[in-house]
Amino acid sequence: MDDPGPAPGVRRRTAILHIGMEKTGTTTLQQALARSTDALTQGGFRYPLLGAGNAHAALVARAKTRGDEADLPALAGRRADENRPAFDARIDAELAREVAAHPDATFILSSEHASSRLNHAPCIRQLKAVLDRHFDDIRICVYLRRWDRMALSAYSTFVQNGLASLAPFQHFRGTSYLDYAGMLARWAAVFGPTRMHVAIFERSELAGGSILPDFAARFGLPTLDERRDANASLDFDDLRALALINRLLENRNLPNASAIRAHIIAGLRKSSGPIPIAPDKARHFNGYYADQAETIRALYFPERPSLFDDDYSGYQVSDGPPVNWQTAAGKLAEALDGVLGGSPSLDPN
């Protein structure tokens, strides 16, 4: 898509485009930005409402090439009776109105789907063309998490959404989801390497120990409305038991599997102890990305001896029995005890 140039009467200005990655506190950041509207306005910033929800998946859907949309329409708030050209026109108009209404503000745009879903250069160029109509200084912000930690965090979410895999590292190894170097190269090629603001998502590396004060410090934002992150992970043994239950639900093809799973998850324990995986397995998994780590370090963190830390103390080989159908059944009984209460809504018949 060619850039048609700035809209008539619209001043050009700065935009901060936060592209994720997923599992790096993006929801926490987006919710805080949405809660901090007054403080942002007083500080000269604007976090606009585009499409649906707190995040800007609508911009990602707007940038996707035809036939490559997956589930983005629903995430972006595309209406049931709205075809793709009408959706594109509406998002363009919403952004234009926001820019016109806040002529002196630095805009903040955020969607973790940008880094994970815009995985082809034409999509990124299309997004740039949309933003270039209004902004001449577009800064790309992305947080990177050590590969093993990213895989385990994503595994937790995926299992809670129905994934049946019992092997988190094998499930993610070699996937585009963890291709940090490729992702960064695509965005730098379109927006320019000097526009890239790459950060490490680890508590010890973040200003104030979390993403909210860190993001605010990087871009001169006022203090954001910080509240406790409610997205706690599940105990890892419970996750693997849930993966077995997911397999059972999938095999039985129950129409209300999602409701059953939600009730089970409500009764499972939250993460509280070491991860029952041998540290060497996590080291080996990260070794697969050693070349990427050095490439990224040399480009964006030349002062660092390594891209990520070498701490594997969070792993510990489990002394308990392996997760099997018997233990899964026990977890299921524990989770359902006192939660379902004989709810007829879960009767598959």
Image (cartoon, grey):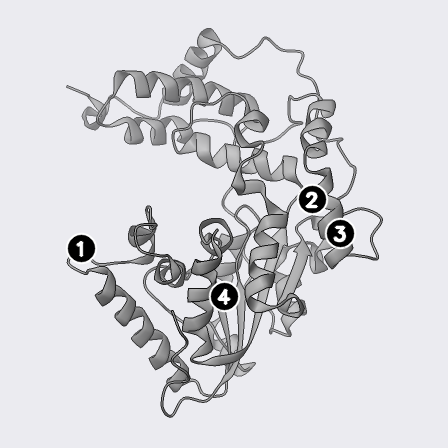
Q: Is residue 40 visible?
A: yes
Number of marks in the rendered image: 4
Q: Tell me the kind of residue under disc 1.
A: Ala
Q: Tell me the kind of residue under disc 2.
A: Gln
Disc 3 residue crowd, few under 14, some 14–19, many 20+, Cα 10 Å: some
Cβ–Cβ under 8 Å for marks 1 and 3: no
Instruction: Name the residue tied to disc 2.
Output: 292
Q: Tell me the kind of residue under disc 3.
A: Arg
Of the numbered discs 4 and 3, the one sitting upstream in the chain is 4
Is 180 positioned to the left or the right of 300 in the image?
left
Q: In the image, which is nearer the foreground, mark 1 or mark 3? A: 3
Of the numbered discs 2 and 1, the one sitting upstream in the chain is 1
Q: Determine the CA span between mark 1 and mark 3.
A: 45 Å
Instruction: Name the residue tied to disc 3.
Output: 297
Of the numbered discs 1 and 3, the one sitting upstream in the chain is 1
The answer to whether 153 is drawn above or below residue 54 in the figure is above
